[in-house]
């Protein structure tokens, strides 16, 4: 049985889910629901431990790819704040591009079903044999909690990979491979046989980010590979292991199925000697997928040409509180989302706009000051118990985030009001974990320079506005100017809701209205939620739509007089 036939039923279910936008996933949502969960989790922990070295004897992560010059690695676990002591092969850049270019021809000649079958097998391999190993790798590099590493960087990232394959197949099948064309020119009747070929653009460079390495990288890799391209993966120096495991899985399946494993390679650098710009400007780079900082993302968009760039960076995700039915439920939901993975997600809310006169509730107006104080208490309640804090806040991925917290705390004391000061919490399992509770500042629209830009990490602002209309105008303007992926609105006024839907649609932020309860406000569901619109500076590409894949290949044609029947 071909690999495509083996995975065809699952692909068909994914197609139907993408069309209906309903809730669906082939994967268990919690680690405990994984088949033979106890044994699988133990095996994953052991597999991760085998990667770790010591200061005296670093452990080499073997990856048989061309051009190895050196062995490097500088990952530090946010949980132990100790180096992982893993060294990876640092390859010569030209050698990677040369090998990738040579690998493309046979891969591009393979039919759509063959490529899709191979790529579905890669995802299946990661799920069956490496999911919990990957979970620990994400935990001890990105700093996510165990459950988030499993769900967000594991099964949900696999879902996004399948989703990209669905759209890649749809885009490619929209091009008929052959046609017969007939038309009269005067007294002559012309009949032509036409052949249409899908031609890959070439070598793609895929950047993965430090906080969520797999979630954007896997669908980007799938989109490029499904359409016939090769991929050079550039992980963040702080989170190499998840992507090294990914590259190894791709290479294993490619090799087993008779394709050149150099279709997928790993390009490493260090913080002190970055290679990102070299990769983007390399003459053989045809595609760039970038997830990461706003500053470098903007550089990529301006400098990638002639390569095509697909970017997702970050922005000012906004909340507007106009009127609510249950203020406590709203603030509890906001508090959970502000704490989730210490707000180190591109969808985390940051700026909370509140009218000066307060928020309308069934019991009357609740003042701006009281709303801020209640929100701070709701966050404090989540952080009070270390066990609960560990599950929700997890760790702070980078020490630079702690430095930013300290800086913003100091500025908030002098220019606004500190509603909640950050402080470390004691992780019950990892006493040396790098942690912090959130910082919440109350400011006004006069302090726009403080909040009109992403402040990465658990930092949020309650912003006093003259009215709900000013709050909407300010929030949507900030999204248009500085970028924003998500937005949240609480209002019982249908006219105001309609205005907000229109304003945020034009600004290009995905809007959630009046949501409370168990679901995190910023949860993005594969097969249903589009991630990023491409309409503001937070990114120019969306996970996942046809535009994400359709320009990764071009169409070439040949035509000739029709052969006699």
Image (spheres, rainbow, N blue to C red):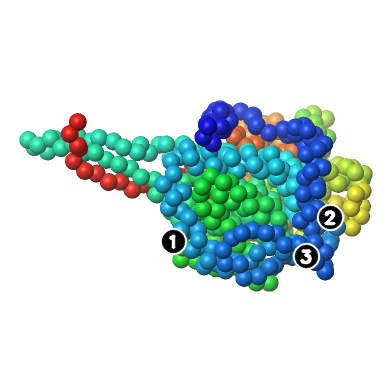
Nearer to the camera, 396 or 260:
260
User: How far is the residue under mark 1 from the one under mark 3?
Assistant: 40 Å
Q: Which residue is mark 3?
A: 58
Q: Which residue is mark 2?
A: 79
Q: Are marks 2 and 1 in contact (CB under 8 Å)?
A: no
Q: Which residue is mark 1?
A: 306
Q: Is residue 329 visible?
A: yes
Q: Is residue 46 above or below residue 120?
A: below
Q: Is residue 407 above or below residue 128?
A: below
User: How far is the residue under mark 2 from the one under mark 1?
Assistant: 41 Å
Q: Which mark is residue 374?
A: none
At a point 65% along the width and 64% down the height, the residue shown is 89
Please, what secondary structure does the residue beneath circle 3 have?
loop
Q: Is residue 204 above or below residue 374?
A: below
Q: Is residue 361 visible?
A: no
Residue 71 as seen in the image, left or right of residue 339: left
Nearer to the camera, 375 or 406:
406
């Amino acid at each position: 049985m071909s690999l495509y036939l083996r995975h065809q039923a699952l692909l068909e279910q994914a197609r139907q889910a993408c069309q209906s936008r309903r809730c669906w996933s082939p994967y268990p949502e919690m680690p405990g629901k994984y088949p033979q969960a106890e044994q699988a989790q133990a095996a994953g922990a052991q597999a991760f431990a085998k990667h770790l070295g010591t200061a005296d004897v670093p452990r080499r992560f073997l990856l048989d790819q061309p051009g190895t010059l050196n062995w490097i690695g500088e990952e530090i676990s946010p949980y132990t704040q100790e180096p992982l002591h893993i060294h990876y092969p640092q390859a010569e850049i030209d050698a990677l591009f040369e090998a990738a270019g040579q690998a493309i021809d046979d891969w591009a000649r393979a039919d759509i079903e063959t490529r899709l079958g191979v790529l579905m097998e890669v995802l299946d391999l990661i799920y069956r044999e490496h999911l919990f190993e990957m979970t620990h790798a994400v935990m001890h590099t990105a700093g996510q909690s165990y459950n988030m590493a499993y769900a967000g960087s594991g099964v949900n990232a696999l879902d996004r990979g399948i989703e990209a394959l669905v759209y890649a197949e749809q885009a490619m099948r929209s091009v008929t491979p052959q046609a017969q064309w007939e038309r009269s020119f005067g007294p002559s009747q012309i009949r032509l046989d036409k052949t249409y070929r899908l031609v890959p653009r070439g070598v793609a460079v895929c950047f993965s980010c430090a906080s969520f390495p797999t979630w954007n990288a896997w669908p980007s890799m799938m989109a490029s590979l499904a359409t016939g391209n090769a991929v050079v993966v550039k992980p963040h120096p702080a989170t190499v292991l998840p992507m090294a495991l990914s590259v190894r899985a791709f290479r294993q399946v490619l090799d087993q199925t008779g394709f050149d494993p150099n279709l997928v390679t790993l390009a490493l650098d260090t913080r002190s000697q970055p290679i990102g710009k070299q990769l983007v400007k390399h003459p053989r780079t045809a595609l760039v997928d970038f997830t990461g900082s706003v500053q470098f993302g903007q550089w990529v968009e301006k400098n990638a040409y002639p390569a095509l760039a697909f970017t997702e960076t970050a922005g000012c995700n906004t909340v507007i509180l106009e009127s609510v039915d249950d203020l406590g439920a709203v603030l509890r939901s906001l508090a959970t989302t502000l704490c989730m993975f210490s707000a180190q997600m591109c969808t985390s809310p940051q700026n909370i706009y509140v009218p000066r006169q307060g928020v309308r509730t069934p019991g009357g107006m609740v003042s701006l000051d009281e709303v801020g104080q209640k929100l701070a208490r709701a966050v404090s309640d989540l952080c009070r118990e270390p066990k609960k804090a560990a599950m929700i806040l997890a760790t702070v991925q980078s020490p630079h985030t702690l430095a930013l917290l300290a800086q913003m705390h100091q500025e908030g004391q002098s220019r606004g009001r500190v509603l909640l000061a950050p402080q470390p919490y004691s992780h019950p399992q990892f006493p040396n974990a790098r942690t912090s509770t959130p910082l919440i500042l109350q400011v006004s629209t006069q302090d726009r320079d403080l909040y009109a830009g992403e402040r990465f990490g658990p930092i949020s602002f309650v912003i006093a506005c003259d009215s709900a209309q000013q709050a909407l105008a300010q929030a949507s303007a900030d999204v248009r100017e500085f970028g924003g992926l998500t937005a949240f609105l609480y209002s019982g006024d249908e006219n105001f809701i309609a205005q907000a839907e229109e304003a945020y649609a034009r600004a290009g932020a995905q809007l959630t209205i009046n949501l409370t309860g168990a679901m995190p406000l910023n949860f993005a569901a594969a097969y249903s939620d589009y991630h990023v619109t491409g309409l503001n500076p937070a990114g120019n590409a969306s996970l996942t739509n046809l535009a994400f894949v359709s320009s990764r290949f071009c169409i070439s044609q040949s035509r000739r007089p029709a052969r006699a029947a």
